[in-house]
Amino acid sequence: MNPTETARRRSPLLFLIPLLIFGGLAIVFGIGLFSGDKSKVPSALIGRVAPAITLAPLEGLQKDGKPLPAFGNADLAKGQATLVNVWASWCAPCRVEHPVLMGLAETDAVKQGKVALVGMNYKDEAENARRFLGALGNPFSAVGVDRAGRAAIEWGVYGVPETFVIGPDGHILEKHVGPLDQAAAGRLLQRALKAR
């Protein structure tokens, strides 16, 4: 048997090895991608003081005839648990979760001031953000504008919407990635109430 015939016989095996390796890797990545709860993305900030932010108020936004304030770290460490929702008017999932936020705003915990619900408006135009809240309702007691997205980067935001539970001492207790549903909102609210 000459070397040419030997090479012809082995060539199908050589092509199968890379395909088998690729197939195995695809299965491993697929399992990792489609298993587990995507809303519980690990964050290095859990248990740490929320990164320092100074946000401007959403220009022209009013509630009960008064300008709605922004918020910063000093507001997050006033002895009250806070839910911080990162949202934008251009974000379709934010529109989906908005009725859930409106429901949170009507809970006794939020109405009685046991838990604050504030919004971080992410990379948005002021007019669009005001129109969004005007059309769907404003659940927030304060809205800070993060036009450049710098505060969101500091907070480890992957994308909007995301919601953080901040303890009364300003520490991040939990993070939810993606739109809130009733179950997730209830869980975050209970976490905030336990932190009081």
Image: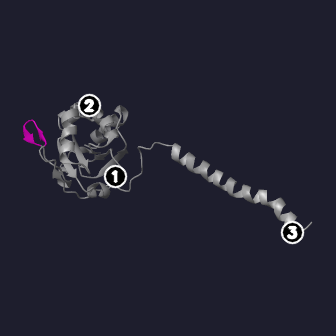
Q: Which residues are magenta?
A: 61-67
Expressed as whole percent of the image width and height from the top left, the position of residue 68 reads 12, 43
User: In the rendered view, would you say 40 is above or below 109?
Assistant: below
Q: Is residue 66 magenta?
A: yes
The answer to whether residue 12 of the structure is visible from this angle is yes
Q: Which residue corresponds to mark 3?
A: 3
Crowding near the residue tagged with mark 2, few <14, some 14–19, many ≥20 C-alpha atoms within 10 Å: few
Q: Which residue corresponds to mark 2?
A: 103
Name the residue located 78 percent from the left edge and 56 percent from the top edge.
Answer: 12
- Secondary structure state at the residue bearing disc 1: loop
Name the residue located 60 percent from the left edge and 50 percent from the top edge.
Answer: 26
Q: Is residue 47 magenta?
A: no
Query: Mark 3 or mark 2, which is nearer to you?
Result: 3
Quadrant of the image for the N terminus? bottom right
Query: From mark 3 to mark 2, how far is it between C-alphas?
Result: 76 Å
Nearest the viewer among 190 and 196 is 190
The amino acid type, in three-letter code, at marker 2 is Gly
